Amino acid sequence: MMSDETRRDSLKEELLQQIQGLHRSQALFPAQSESTQAIDALVQQLEELNPNPEPLRAAALPLLLGNWQLIYASQGTVVTRRLADSQNMLPDIELKQVWQKLVMSSAGTLAVDNEAELEIPFLGHWRLTASGTWQVKDPQLAQVCFSAFSLQAIRLFGQKDWQLPALTVPILENLRREAAWTTSYLDFDLRVGRGASANIFVFCRQS
């Protein structure tokens, strides 16, 4: 009989192959197809073999923290949904990548930056960042609250070393919104999260 580790490795390999076969517009933008349904089914099988069922416990934090590239979102993200809605007005904006940084703050809380890099015609590459915290509710569930957004030009007019300081806009406390976030799978180089609407997010660790 196949061990859990062997089955997990096989599922991961198949999952990554399926995701790599998608165009970015299918992987990160809201879209449903037979391919995405197959990916969602693979994710569910992988979650059942989660080697770290309590990923928000202190013992698992070394695995959880770091930089994670988003490679799949079953219902898109906040940024990609808005881009999809504005394609008629802004058809040439290209999403380059999306990633998430998780660190332990000096206050002992989990701090998160959700970041996206966009290429805008004639204006170069820009980075959008939403910064906030994870308030741990149980070993898998966190309440996410974002406290600031920032925008930064990171590559203007094709010049790699030409950057502008980030423009940060804090969110007033009474305007902040919280959302539930479940970490349903975690190993060294792969992480799965689920939002309040059961949206599946698959991340790969960035070196």
Image (spheres, helix red, strand yellow):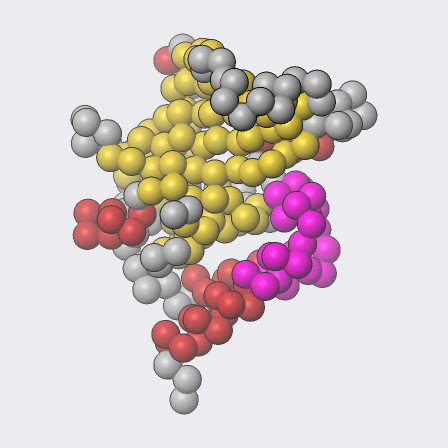
Residue at 34% over, 37% down: 102
Residue at 66% over, 45% down: 24
Magenta portion: prevailing SS class: helix
- Measured as percent of width and height from the top left, residue 78 is found at 57, 31
Q: Nearest the camera: 123 or 40?
A: 123
Residue at 53% over, 42% down: 197
Q: Nearest the camera: 198 or 76?
A: 76
Drawn side of residue 24 relative to residue 6, left or right: right
Q: Quadrant of residue 19?
A: bottom right
- Measured as percent of width and height from the top left, residue 31 is found at 70, 46
Residue 169 visible (yes or no): yes
As for residue 84 lying within the magenta part, the answer is no
* Span highlighted in magenta in the image: 16-39
Q: Quadrant of residue 156?
A: top right
Q: Quadrant of residue 146?
A: top left
Drawn side of residue 33 relative to residue 41, left or right: right
Residue at 49% over, 13% down: 164
As for residue 17 lying within the magenta part, the answer is yes
- 206 versus 121 height, above or below: below
Q: Nearest the camera: 167 or 60?
A: 167
- Measured as percent of width and height from the top left, residue 158 is found at 62, 24
